[in-house]
Image (spheres, rainbow, N blue to C red):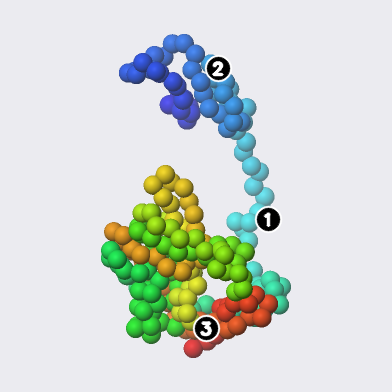
Amino acid sequence: MENGFSSIRNNPSGGAIPKTGKSKFYTTELSFEDNFDPSNYIQKNTQHPTIKEDDSFTKPANPEPEKQKETINDISSHKVKQSGSPLMCYVVRLKHGDELRKSLLSFVKKNGLKAAFIMSCVGSCTSARVRLASATPENEANYMLDLINPMEIVSLDGTLSGGGHLHVGLADYSGKMMGGHLLELVVDTTAEVVIGDCSSLSFTRTYDQSTGFHELQVSDR
């Protein structure tokens, strides 16, 4: 590496790459150049921004309460929860053969968590069933995907209290990603889940005529 740039060189014969001859260098212009001179590139492309007194770092981290309230209320016509909540965290490890969704909902109910949500999850599964995009209550049977190959759990997001609403991202042996609304997932080796609970709030789900599904409602305890 010279002057902060590393070269990309092809050496089919293996071993040390000779310093003589032409080499290919990858630049931020997304092009390859022969005999690239990093010093010229640095001089040509280095820019030093001018800092003004009114730039963001001189401004308060949060707007004034009145302006913040106006901004939040402008987001939508729906009621927005503006106050924060203390957070409790729980760690659950599921084992081979456990059904993830039912196990997590059971844990939430057993521990009386009223506003639980997924913070993180890593693990693997032997099978899963997800509902795909564009599904409605009338046609959702046509938008089901049954996955029966071993897969890595790349992501898991959503709420658990009030019945739960989870989305999952899975990767197969080739790295191909797939996912959707989680209906069922059987754990393979492990599922390490961190659950958060907003201890001053309560999650419920009520029927929304505009979507046809039961949607999240947030209230104070």
* Amino acid at circle 3: Thr
Based on the displayed image, in which of its 4 quarters is residue 27 positioned?
top right
In space, the residues marked 2 and 3 are separated at their CA atoms by 62 Å
Pointer 2 residue:
34
Neighbor class of circle 3 (other Cα within 10 Å; few <14, some 14-19, many 20+) is some
Farthest top residue in view: 21
Q: Position of residue 159 (x, y in %)?
A: 48, 73
Can residue 39 be seen by looking at this rendering?
no
Q: Position of residue 79 (x, y in %)?
A: 65, 80
Pointer 1 residue:
54
Q: Taking 171 as reference, is 44 above or below it?
A: above
Element under disc 2: strand
**Which labelled disc corresponds to residue 204?**
3
Farthest bottom residue in view: 221
Disc 1 to disc 2: CB gap under 8 Å: no
Q: Position of residue 216 (x, y in %)?
A: 56, 78
In space, the residues marked 1 and 2 are separated at their CA atoms by 44 Å
